[in-house]
Amino acid sequence: MSTESSSSNDKTKPNTLFLNTSRLDYDEGNKLDFSHLSEITNFIRNDVDHVVDDNDGSEILKLIEEANAEIVITKEMEISASTFKKFPKSVKLHCEAGTGYNNIPIEVARSKGISVCNIPTYSNESVAHMVITYIMNFSAAIFEQAKLLQSGDKRNFYGAFSHPIYEITGKTLGLIGGSGTIGRCVCDVAIPLGMNIIISSRNPSLPDGHKYANHPQVKVVSSLPELLQNSDFVSINCPLNAQTRHMIGEKEIKQMKKSAFLINTARGAIINEEELIQCMKEKVIAGCGLDTQEVEPPKEDSGLWDLENVFLTPHIGWRRLETRQRLVDMTASNIEAYISGDPTNVVN
């Protein structure tokens, strides 16, 4: 493991340490541009995918202390409360290079006077396109056909087609947590394709000024069962918190149509994975697409790997090159706002 500075040390600039740069910048030749960060701070990159937070957090703390970091950046890297409590006094800002921040002990950060900021909007279109990609693949049985060909089975080329395929025009897409920005971006693509939308919300209608308020193809319901029972595709687009953890389990899946598909591009723990596995073994619904899992990657003995009707992708909703560059640029903007004394996207 090595650290390298991308700028000469300037005592008028804060020291910034990106603890796991390779989580973002993993392409051959390091395609991402960090020049803005280097212009506004003394930027230090630690080119690993993650730093293990062991029992005492010694490796993380050593890197922060060696950098004398005022600003720490992480991407989807778990930091325990016990380690965060030991952060040196130099640290004033912790930037999560992403939307979710459940990997950071917010209460501990608040108690230490460390501001935590995130990037709530960098991957809206990319994640929305991931939802549509799953829908398109499910509607044409692309995944199943690819599996047959990989096993040498060419039956669909010579005989009756062995999987149901259908147009998505007129089908209903249920969006759990769909009143937010990503849900709106999903609607931007799904509605022109002719899909009908059901959005679950605690409010009886979309807020004033929402792009799809009173749209003829959009219905808002306060009842999750109503959404589940009437959707051909169900997409999870809500954040993970105490209220949403394991909100989708056996009871909810059994309320869906037998022909329906479940898609999760949000956070894996919103689904009770053990109950999902059992439901998919019993073929309660037609299929499931998971870009996020409760543990990423799933454990080697996870039942998810071997289910023929569950399709996994390694959390790629945010990984498109343009999306990752936008994330770097927006992280730099957060830090620039902090330096100017007007911090943005602070979550604590």
Image (tube, rainbow, N blue to C red):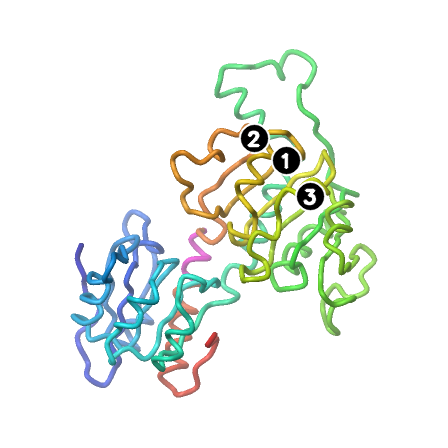
Three-letter code for the amino acid on which mark 3 is drawn: Phe
In magenta, the rendered stretch is 320-325
Residue at the location (73% across, 73% down)?
209
Three-letter code for the amino acid on which mark 1 is drawn: Phe
Horizontal side, residue 222 vs residue 62: left or right: right
Considering every residue shown, the one lying at the far top of the view is: 158
Is 161 above or below relative to 337?
Answer: above
Q: CA distance from mark 1 to mark 3?
A: 9 Å
Q: Nearer the viewer, residue 336 or 274?
A: 274
Q: Position of residue 318 (x, y in %)?
A: 47, 54
Q: Going from the N terminus, do you reach mark 1 or mark 3 first?
A: 1
Q: Which residue is mark 2?
A: 143
The reply to whether the C-beta atoms of the residues labelled 1 and 3 are less than 8 Å apart is yes
Residue at the location (26% across, 54% down)?
48
Quadrant location of residue 165?
A: top right
Q: Which mark is residue 233?
A: 3
Horizontal side, residue 263 vs residue 228: left or right: left
Task: State yes or no: residue 50 in magenta.
Answer: no
- Helix, strand or loop for disc 1: helix
Q: Position of residue 13 (x, y in %)?
A: 25, 82
Q: CA distance from mark 1 to mark 2?
A: 7 Å
* For discs 1 and 3, the disc positioned in front in the rendered view: 3
